[in-house]
Amino acid sequence: MESVDYHSAAAMLAWQIELGADESICDQPLNRYELPAALAKPAKAAVANDPKARPTPPPVYEVPKVDGAAISRDLAAKAGDLVALEQAVAGFEHCELKRGARNMLFGQGVAGASVMVIGDAPNRDDDRAGVFLEGARGLLFDKMFSAIGLSRTGEAPAVYYSHIMPWRPPQDRDPKPDELSMMKPFIERQITLVNPDVLILMGNIACQCMMGKRGMTRLRGDWVEVMGKPTLPMFHPSQLMRTPIAKRDAWADLLSVKSRIQD
């Protein structure tokens, strides 16, 4: 093979580059599609059959469970007034309902109200508007209590209203038992701070949480005691709108409340 001088080799290289060559290869052609005659068996099979050769699995660390109810009891006990209690509820991060709700509905009214009403959890309309008993349910509630001389927004004797849960459950489902037990210390402290003469539980969920019972048709109209307060289960305005005939029973319950606070 004749030797090629530097300038000739440079000229041939430039010509190859001009043709589009962008890399150099070996002197001998390489078949990249050719498979080796025999493939080595993977070492994994030997490891699988030899317990001593198996890698040690990483340690599993269990996330410690948080007792949300114990934390809420501690926070509630430290709240000296309704403002402090509302701040404690707002800062409570252990209830998953908080993450899906738009607004927190703590309570409406002032301490010392004659009547405290605890209703079921907020629904979609309440959560969107950030208002207690948004829409027709609120109008019905106000008409019911104004008929016996009580108001959510007026002077004493006044009504203090609160939901059993400060946040709306997704899809307006019923709160789960663990959610109720987690938030119950806050509502109990709220009752203590409001210190009403009479307590009204409106709806099955409120009765389930505070009395451990459900079934408004059976429970309504009978006075019981909750946290040392005379307590009356009543139909929720939502149920009265679905079953108008139950308004007769609701009116009898309202007259019973009027008689109790006038004694």
Image (cartoon, rainbow, N blue to C red):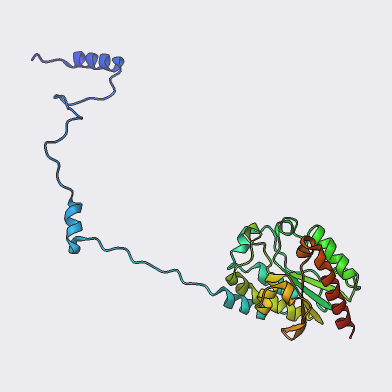
- In-image side of 75 versus 234 (left or right): left
- Give the total number of marks visible in the rendering: 0
Taking the spot 24% from the left edge, 61% from the top edge, the residue there is 55
- In-image side of 261 versus 10 (left or right): right
Examine the rendering and report whether any part of residue 79 can be seen: no
Vertical arrangement, residue 240 with respect to residue 159, above or below = above
Q: Position of residue 222 (x, y in %)?
A: 77, 80
Q: Position of residue 121 (x, y in %)?
A: 69, 66
Taking the spot 68% from the left edge, 68% from the top edge, the residue there is 165
Q: Position of residue 212 (x, y in %)?
A: 65, 78
Question: Who is closer to the viewer here, 90 or 142?
Answer: 142
* Outermost residue to the left: 1
Quadrant of the snapshot with the N terminus? top left
**Within the image, what quadrant is residue 247 found in?**
bottom right
Quadrant of the snapshot with the C terminus? bottom right
Examine the rendering and report whether any part of residue 201 can be seen: yes
* Outermost residue to the front: 245
Question: Who is closer to the viewer here, 159 or 63?
Answer: 159
- In-image side of 142 versus 190 (left or right): right
Q: Position of residue 234 (x, y in %)?
A: 77, 73
Question: Who is closer to the viewer here, 177 or 57?
Answer: 177
Vertical arrangement, residue 97 with respect to residue 32, above or below = below
